[in-house]
Amino acid sequence: MKSGRIHILLLSLLLCISCRYEQQSYPPLMERAVQLMETHPDSALACLDSLSISTTEWPEELHIYYLLLTVKAKDKLYIPVTSDTLINRIISFYEDKQDDPHLMEAYYYKGSTYRDMKDAPRAVDAFLRAAEIGKRCSNDTLNGRIYGQLASLFAFQRLYHESMEATQQAYKYNLACHNYKGMAFGLRDMARIYDTNNQKDSAEIYYRKAYTLMKEKVSLVKACSIGDEMAGFYYNQGKTDSAEIIAKQVQAHHPSSLSHLVLGKVYYQRQMFDSASVYLQKVISGNGIYNKSTAFSILAAISEKQKKYPEAYLYASLCINAFDSLFQITKTEEVNKIHSLYNYNLSEQENQRLQSKTERQKLLLFQLLFVASLLIGIVIYLLHRLRERRRKYTIREQQLQQIFAEQEAQSSRRILENEQQITLLNEQLQSAMLENDTFKHSLLEAQTKRLGATNEQIRAIRNEQEMRLLAFRHSDIYLHFHHATQSSEITERDWKHLSEAINSTFPNFLRQLYALYPQLSEHELHICYLIKIELKRSIIAELLNRSVSAITNSLSRLYQKIYSEKGTAQQMEGIIQEL
């Protein structure tokens, strides 16, 4: 009887174990997805998608693991995530279960989720939480990836010391699991940090180690991505021969935009313009906007040296457009948020202490006082700046008036003194004639003629401006600007000749113009030159490749800069013509 009961208990225990085993086993397609996850995440996601209909009937633990695998596959396929709802549900489940291996992985993908959502502070917080759990786990591969993500974020916010520590941790974990690809990228990241910190010898050593390790342990194709950077590093160090060798090695196995660019730079530096153009043309046919902008810039320089000015203008325009695109891309990366990553935990702890009503009121009062102080400071600064502008304007006006007055007074004074001297000499001349002193008469007559000639010279100087203006209006450079119809007809040499001609015709023009506004830009100076040679605004707009309204606005703004009050373009034109 007892023996029968024992057999029944053993049978029941085996059934329980069997049931437990059945609950922990995975469907074949899920197991297949796990196998394909690292090498073919697209196929893994397809397997998981085919199971989506039946997941609602699964036990919760199996369903949550299915969701984690789905998140993992999408992350590997760079499919952006727009919500943290799903990953928070997964983390909540594994926290309740105290399942550290899966919780560590869930926090890693939580960090990836916030990274995709551009929420950098919470991304760093999640990766740090994953790293903390990782200390209790033996998943070296995942630990390497966690510290790799932290290293990238720290480097992006220029925390290079912290980035180096994270990179070294990532390298240690990758070494433990023989992840040679991760090790090579870790060495490359160390080289980048050394390069940024101006430790060029160390950077070169680590670039070589990374390139050699990737080439020997992974593949030549994978090594090419490091070879690209290494070639660029050598070029920036002035080692063009080494840069050419590495770039050509990359070209032999996996041609890339960066290797094309390095070779283009090398051959441009060697004045081998045809070879440089061949590689730079390959760059601009690619997709990298940064490399394309550099290639456009060099092609513009090559075309200019070859006197192919239309092509130079085209490449220069494309270069400007590329730089505009880069600016728009960079503007979207909120650097201020990135700077708050490392201190996010501390700020979160501080925010939790600010929960009482009194502290909130103090904070609000402080903010109001700060805003009020800031506004008062801005008002004081603006008033001071306005007074300073008016004072400078008054000083400039006085200086100009003083210059004009001194010049006129000096001319008049010299003429008056000479006329008085001539009168005195005439009296002495008459006295010499009466005394019949021939020598004295000749001497006095010569002095009288010299003073008369001096007065005539002074009067001639006053009229010389009119003659210079007449000659200027018939000069080649004056006629060239009046006959030109578009900006491509005007070169830097033409601007230089026009400046020299204006300075020769109106000697005080530039000095008086800079006395009015010392911070005059080159664009504003060119407008003033063209106004001075009596060109209409419509012609000026064509020669400067601007709209008429832009020229009008520039003149109005220049007037406001000088006089600290609004004025019209006509008023500024009048001032320029009077100088």
Image (cartoon, rainbow, N blue to C red):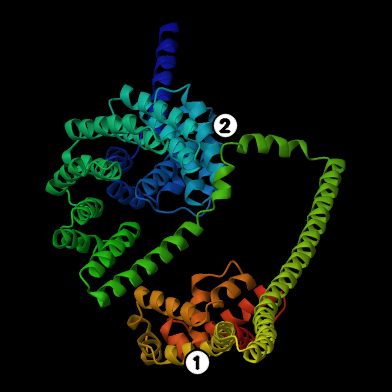
Q: Residue furthest front?
A: 436
Instruction: Identify which residue is drawn at 52% across, 33% down.
Output: 128
The residue type indicated by label 1 comes to Lys
- Residue 508: quarter of image: bottom right
Relative to 298, is 441 above or below?
A: below
Compare residues 455 and 336 and report the one nearer the observer: 455
- Residue 386: quarter of image: bottom right
* Callout 1: SS: loop
Q: Which residue is mark 2?
A: 96
Q: Which quadrant does the N terminus fall into?
A: top left
Q: Which mark is residue 521?
A: none
Mark 1 or 2: the one toward you: 1
Mark closest to the chain's N terminus, 1 or 2: 2
Instruction: Identify which residue is drawn at 56% across, 70% down.
Output: 520
Confirm whether residue 398 shows in the render: yes
Q: Which residue is mark 1?
A: 536
Compare residues 66 and 7 and report the one nearer the observer: 66
Relative to 49, is 405 above or below?
A: below
Compare residues 488 and 120 and report the one nearer the observer: 488
x and y, in percent, of residue 354 in the image: 78, 39
